[in-house]
Structure formats: C-alpha cells, structure tokens
Amino acid sequence: MDEELLGPLEALLFLAASPQTPQSLADALGIREEDTLALLHKLSEEYTRGRQRGFYLKEAGGGWRFYTHPRYADIITAHVTARQSGKLSQAALETLAVIAYKQPVTRAQVAAIRGVNVDGVVRTLLTRGLIKETGEGATGAILYGTTPFFLEAMGMNSLNELPPLAPYLPEADELDDVEKEIR
C-alpha cells in the first residue's frame, strides 16, 4: 500500500458530491480496488482517532465520502436552516417509509396504505431525489422506489438495513377485534 496516495485519495473524496465506489477511486488513482479499500480504511481510522475533527470518512450509499461529525449537528443545522428549511413533513416521511418498505409501489398503493392522496408528496420526494420512477406495473401505473441518495441520507448501504416492521405491527388478535368492529 503506497501511503503517497493518501493525499490524492483525500483530494478525490473532498471534491466528491456523492459517495464514491472503491473501484472508481482505484481507477482514478491507477491502483487495485483492494489497495484503495486499504487506503480508505486507513484514512477513516486517522480521522476517528486523535484530534477532534469536524468530519469523518464513512462508507454509505454504495460508496465512500466525507460526512460532518454528529457532534457538530446543532451548528450545521442552524447554519443550513438559516437559509432554508430542509425538513420533510410528516406526510412526506410517512409516504417515504411506505415506499421504502413496499417498493416497487404505485402512487395508488401508497395512497391506499396511507388513506390519503399522495400525489403532491410524491412530487416533493421526486424533486428532492429521495425516490425515483422504477418502471411500470401490470396496469401501466408508474412504480416508485428509493434512490441511492435516500440510502446516503439515511446512512445505510442497502435497504436490508431498514429496521424490521414486525415490532410495530398489531398482534393478530388485535386485528381480529378491529375486523369485528368494522362489520
């Protein structure tokens, strides 16, 4: 592993607007992917020990990039929100959760689950790059799924890291009671 490549690797990561795959970084540096991974892990270790830095190097969203350190979240949030509000509404968060867990899914399916029209919320999520059109269903309706930016924003590498829903679902006998009330 050539430590002289740590500087160029840092420069590439510094300029990256999205997570960079080890292979793309290896190609840029002209080295093997395995060597690039070793360098990434070395840099990551250097940033997490010693002096308290305002950033760290993390693998998320299918690649590596710099992130601001959570201990400075209040300062960063105040700075960013002073210019604009980036928070999602409760409706947007609920819609995003349905899409994340049920994808690929149509607007009509999301609306049926939520019990309200989701057209405007879906447009907002598309605009923010959190979801994308993934194709057409059997009826010709557009299917939606999450994007790599969603994974990055959530600090995940794959949808397998979503928490399980089972602990939040009602027990079977509770569902039977609800069904009886409906009749």
Image (tube, rainbow, N blue to C red):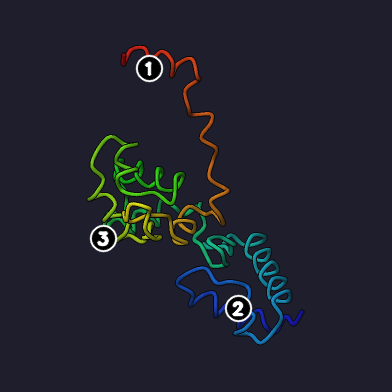
Name the secondary structure under disc 1.
Answer: helix
The residue carrying pointer 1 sits among few (fewer than 14), some (14 to 19) or many (20 or more) residues within 10 Å by Cα, namely few
Q: Position of residue 115 (x, y in %)?
A: 28, 34
Image point (55%, 79%), residue name: 12
Disc 3 and disc 1: Cα gap in Å?
Answer: 48 Å
In the picture, the quarter occupied by the N terminus is bottom right
Name the secondary structure under disc 2.
Answer: helix
Disc on the earlier residue, 3 or 1: 3
Q: Nearer the viewer, mark 2 or mark 3?
A: 2
Disc 2 and disc 3: Cα gap in Å?
Answer: 33 Å
The residue carrying pointer 3 sits among few (fewer than 14), some (14 to 19) or many (20 or more) residues within 10 Å by Cα, namely few
Q: Is residue 13 above or below residue 53?
A: below
Q: Which residue is mark 2?
A: 25
Disc on the earlier residue, 2 or 1: 2
Residue type for callout 2? Leu
Disc 2 and disc 1: Cα gap in Å?
Answer: 56 Å
Query: Camera-side residue: 84 or 125?
Result: 125
The residue carrying pointer 2 sits among few (fewer than 14), some (14 to 19) or many (20 or more) residues within 10 Å by Cα, namely many
Q: Position of residue 111 (x, y in %)?
A: 29, 41
Q: Which residue is mark 3?
A: 83
Q: Which residue is mark 1?
A: 179
Image point (57%, 67%), residue name: 64
Image point (57%, 48%), residue name: 161
Farthest right residue in view: 1
Residue type for callout 3? Arg
Disc on the earlier residue, 2 or 3: 2
Q: Are marks 2 and 1 in contact (CB under 8 Å)?
A: no
Q: Position of residue 76 (x, y in %)?
A: 40, 57
Q: Position of residue 164 (x, y in %)?
A: 55, 37
| Residue 75 shown left or right of residue 165 in the figure | left
Farthest front residue in view: 138
